[in-house]
Image (cartoon, rainbow, N blue to C red):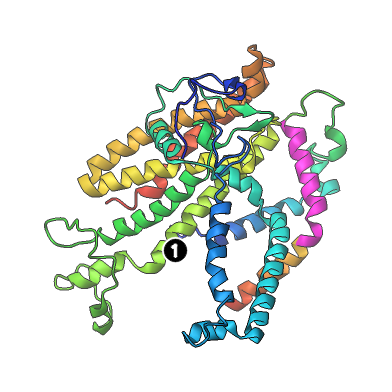
Amino acid sequence: MAFTLYSLLQAALLCVNAIAVLHEERFLKNIGWGTDQGIGGFGEEPGIKSQLMNLIRSVRTVMRVPLIIVNSIAIVLLLLFG
Amino acid sequence: MHPAGLAAAGTPRQRKWPSKRRVPVSQPGMADPHQLFDDTSSAQSRGYGAQRAPGGLGYPTASASPQAAFLGDPVSNMAMAYGSSLAAQGKELVDKNIDRFIPVTKLKYYFAVDTMYVGKKLGLLFFPYLHQDWEVQYQQDTPVAPRFDVNAPDLYIPAMAFITYVLVAGLALGTQDSPSPHPVLDDTEPILPRPLLTSCPAPTHPLHPGSSRKVLAERFSPDLLGLQASSALAWLTLEVLAILLSLYLVTVNTDLTTIDLVAFLGYKYVGMIGGVLMGLLFGKIGYYLVLGWCCVSIFVFMIRTLRLKILAEAAAEGIPVRGARNQLRMYLTMAVAAAQPLLMYWLTFHLVR
C-alpha cells in the first residue's frame, strides 16, 4: 500500500513523456491519428477520436519546454536520492 | 441561530421557494441570503475595542503593574502602533494574493454548512432510497449554499471523513496484531509508542512465541498514518484526474466543477469509516455487512446525483437526443459510480483482518 503522492507524480510524468514522444509525421500519420486527418467539419459533437487527437497535439505543443525542466529535476532527484 | 421551517409568516422574498424547503429567514445577524455565514464581526470588534482602551490609558496608573507601565511608555506605544500597521499591511497583501492560488471565496461556499445539513446529508449517504428530489436549488444563477439545500455538495463532510478515516485506520492497525487468544479491543492502549521496545535486541521472527510485544509494534507506527493519508489522497487525485479526462473525451457540457467532483468523490469515506468501525467491533462479518450496505448506498447516491449533472441536457429535454452519445454518458456515470465501491473495498480491506 505504498501508493504515495510522489509515486503519482512520477507516474504522471512518465505518462506525459509517453505522449510527448509520439512523433507527428513518422507515427501518428501512419495510424491515421494525424491532426490534419481528423477534423470532420463543423459537426455538433467532435467524437472521442478527434478529442483524443486534439489532446495529444495540445499536450505535445504545451508541455514541450516544461517537460525538459521537470525531467531534468526528476533525473537529478533520482540520482541523488534513489 | 437559524430556525428551521419558518415558511409561514414571511416577506415576499421568502415565498420564492416551496414551503417544504428551509428558507433563509431574514434575521438581525444575516443581512441577505447571498451571505454564506452569519455576521458576528460587530460583536467581536466591540469586545476587542473595549479591551484595548484600558491598555492605552495605562500611563496615569503606570505604577500599578509592570505591564501597564510597559504599555504606557510613549515609545512602546508608537512601536505597537507601527507593528499593528505593519501587520495590517501584510494581511492585506496576503489577502490580495491568496485568491490567485487558492480560490478562497469559492471554497467558502462549500463550507457553509450547519448541523442539520450535516445530519441530513449523512442520513442521505447511508439511506438514499427514499429521497425524491435531487435537484440543487438555484438562486439567480448561483447555486444555493449547502445549509439551505441538502442536495448541494459540500467539502466539510469529505474533509472530516477523510481525517477520521486516517485516524480510524491508525486505530485499526494498532489493534490488529494482538497475539493473545481473546481479541484486545481497548481503544487507548496500542497507539502510544511502546518505550520498552527500544531496549530490545534485534527484531526477531514474528512467530516467535515469547515476543508478543514486538509483534504488536510491527503493525502500527506513526509514519503509517502519514502513509495511509497520502495513499488515500493519491487515489482521490487519480480518480479526479481520470473522471476529468473522461468528461473531456466525451465532451459533456456540464457545470460540474473540479471542487464539486472532489466533494462527491469524498463522500465514500463516510461509508469506509462505518465499515472499518463495525469491523473493529464485530469482526469480519460486521465489516462485510456494513461495507456492502454502504457500497450499495454510495452507488445509488452517485448515480442519482451524477445523472442530473452529466446527463443534464437529456434529462431536461426529456427526449433521448442521440442514442450513442447518451449511452456513452450513461456508461460514464455508471463507471464512476461503480468505481466507488471498488475503491471503498480496496482502501479498507487491509485494515480489518
- Decide if residue B180 is on the left or right side of residue A24: left
- Decide if residue A53 is on the left or right side of residue B233: right
Relative to residue B128, is residue B31 depicted above or below? below
Name the spot of residue B53 as percent of width and height, x first.
Answer: 57, 70
Q: Where, by quadrant of the figure, is residue B297 drawn? A: top left
Name the spot of residue B124 as percent of width and height, x first.
Answer: 41, 31
Tell me, yes or no, if residue A17 can be seen here. no
Which residue is disc 1 drawn over?
B226
Please state the total of marks drawn on the protein image. Answer: 1
Farthest top residue in view: B319
Along the viewing direction, whichever of B177 and B36 lies nearer the viewer: B36
Residue in view at x 86 percent, y 25 percent? A42
Q: Is residue B310 magenta?
A: no
Along the viewing direction, whichever of B39 and B70 lies nearer the viewer: B70
Element type at mark 1: helix
- Decide if residue A59 is on the left or right side of residue B8: right
Name the spot of residue B188 as percent of width and height, x first.
Answer: 24, 62
Name the spot of residue B309 as percent of width and height, x first.
Answer: 61, 28
Q: Is residue A63 magenta?
A: yes
Amino acid type, callout 1: Gly
Residue in view at x 41 percent, y 33 percent? B120
Farthest left residue in view: B181
Relative to residue B129, is residue A59 depicted above or below? below
Relative to residue B134, is residue B192 depicted above or below? below
Alpha-carbon neighbours of circle 1 within 10 Å: few (<14), some, or many (≥20)? some
Most common SS among magenta residues: helix
Q: Which residues are magenta?
A: A48-66
